[in-house]
Amino acid sequence: MRRAALAVAGLLVFLNVPFAGPATAATQQVMMQDYAYSPAALTVRVGDTVTWMQHDQAPHDVVTTSAPVAFRSPQLSAGQSWSYSFRQPGTYQYYCSVHPDMRASVTVLPAPTPAPPKPATTAPRTTPRQTTTAGTPAAAAPPTTPPATTPPPAATDPAAPAAPATEPQPAVQQATAATPATLDPMLLVAGLVTGIAVLCLLLLSSRRA
């Protein structure tokens, strides 16, 4: 039972899968009956095969009178058949050489060209997100804002009152200590000699007294 269920399931899957193989050639039939070809005009494609079936008691054959490629069948008795595969497009006129009033034609069309495969659509590429060492997505960096520019100073309104000018502050005079004038060394020496001389005179005068 289990194998049967699997076989049924496989068959269903096979039936649902579309078959994309090349189209197989078709086979058409022409009846040779009552001293006529039926159908008298047939349209096929390159690669198709036409089979003539003989149902009359009198013999018949298939002989081309005007065709891209000439062909001729053997004489067929009742119950026999003959097939021909068309490889070149065009119109094939033929008749029965035993009964010339039996005439027909086969029009062969070019083989259909397969449609070109559709190009595969590619999904838009996405920028991979950065992840941290722990495996969690990293937070997006905040957008950088341009530095705020200082607006230029507003032009002074001529109608607005001008601000009072600030009075200049008096310069602070630094008190400087009076520094003694520098004396000439020669004057110091002269004064010292004069003082010694006066002292000597006073000593001498005190001894004489």
Image (spheres, rainbow, N blue to C red):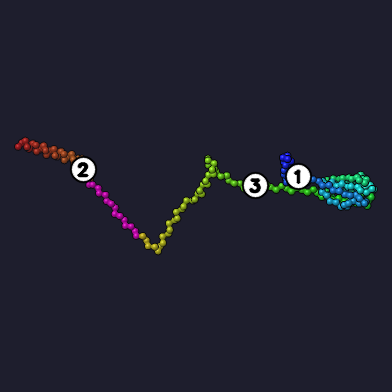
**Location of the N terminus (image quadrant):** top right
- State the residue at coordinates (85%, 51%): 42
Of the residues tagged 1 and 2, which is closer to the observer? 1
The residues bearing labels 1 and 3 have C-alpha atoms spaced at a distance of 26 Å
Q: Residue 88: percent from the left, percent from the top?
A: 83, 47
Label 2, label 3: how many angstroms apart (C-alpha)? 107 Å
Q: Is residue 26 visible?
A: yes
Q: Which residues are magenta?
A: 164-178
Q: In the figure, is residue 167 to the left or right of 179?
A: right
| Amino acid type assigned to the residue bearing label 2 in the image | Leu
Q: Please identify the residue farthest to the left as the structure is shown.
A: 209
Query: Residue tagged by mark 2?
Result: 183
The one of 155 and 109 positioned closer to us in this rendering: 109
- Residue closest to the far top: 207
For residue 99, side relative to residue 91 (left or right): right
Tell me which label, 1 or 3, sits earlier in the chain.
Answer: 1
Disc 1 or 2, which lies upstream in sequence? 1
Amino acid bearing label 1: Gly
Of residues 45 and 182, the one drawn nearer to the viewer in this rendering: 45
Circle 1 sits on which residue?
21
Q: CA distance from mark 1 to mark 2?
A: 131 Å
Foreground mark, 2 or 3, reads 3
Residue identified by numbered label 3: 122
Residue at 23% x, 47% y: name it: 177
